[in-house]
Image: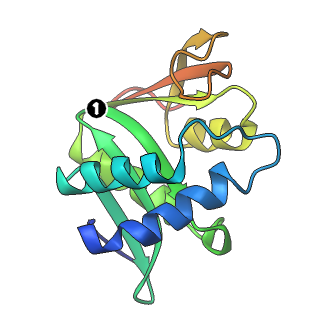
Amino acid sequence: MRLARAHIWQVPRLAAILWAYTRGTPGQPCARSRVEDLHLLWRETWRGRVRVARVRGRIAGFILRRATRVHALHVAPDMRGQGVGRALLSDAQARAGVLDLWVLEANRRARAFYVRAGFAEAAQDRRGGGNDEGLPDIRMVWQRGEAQA
């Protein structure tokens, strides 16, 4: 697996991975149009805030991080459970002393993933202030050197 900064020409693949979750998960509302998603991914990739994981030459997942905030971590459906998300998150942790993110309260699988990576729940927002969909979410925080749960 190879981790690297994303490039503009990779935005269509990043969008496909994003849409596999946002449009492929039953009950998951879409907060943005496809055009808005493409614009956001293009802008954040241009600014150097997106890193990708490549497996056998193919983009398998990506993480979007602004300073200490992880805004998105998505893995292609056929690559889930193979360490791609963990590698992307470990890379972000190696580059920062503290990270935080918001995860949907209903996404128990993601919450467990972040707990295994050393994140702890720090706050809850029943109104969904940490996500575009307005769904209840939980702020999770990781800090280098803190005792792992």
Q: Quadrant of residue 5?
A: bottom left
- Image-based side of 71 in relation to 137, left or right: left
- Which amino acid type corresponds to the residue marked 1 in the rendered image? Thr
For the C terminus, the quadrant is top right
Count of picture labels:
1
Give left or right: position of 40 versus 44. Answer: right
Q: Nearer the viewer, residue 31 or 115?
A: 31
Q: What kind of colouring is applied to the model shown?
A: rainbow
Please say if 55 is above or below 75.
below
Q: Can you give x and y, in whole percent of width and height, for residue 27 in the image?
A: 81, 40
Residue drawn at (48%, 62%), measured in percent from left and top?
15
**Residue located farthest toward the left when viewing the structure as drawn:** 47
Q: Position of residue 140 (x, y in %)?
A: 50, 25
Vertical relation: 78 (above or below) 58: above
Provide residue 59's location: percent of width, then percent of height. Answer: 44, 75
Residue at 54% in and 64% down: 17
Q: Quadrant of residue 83?
A: bottom right
Tag 1: Cα neighbours inside 10 Å, few (<14), some, or many (≥20)?
A: some
Residue 74 visible in rendering: yes
Which secondary structure lies at badge 1?
Answer: loop
**Can residue 144 be seen?**
no
Q: Is residue 77 above or below residue 136?
A: below
Q: Quadrant of the N terminus?
A: bottom left
Residue at x 41% of width, y 38% of height:
71
Residue at image location 24% in from the left, 39% down from the top: 96
Residue corresponding to mark 1:
68
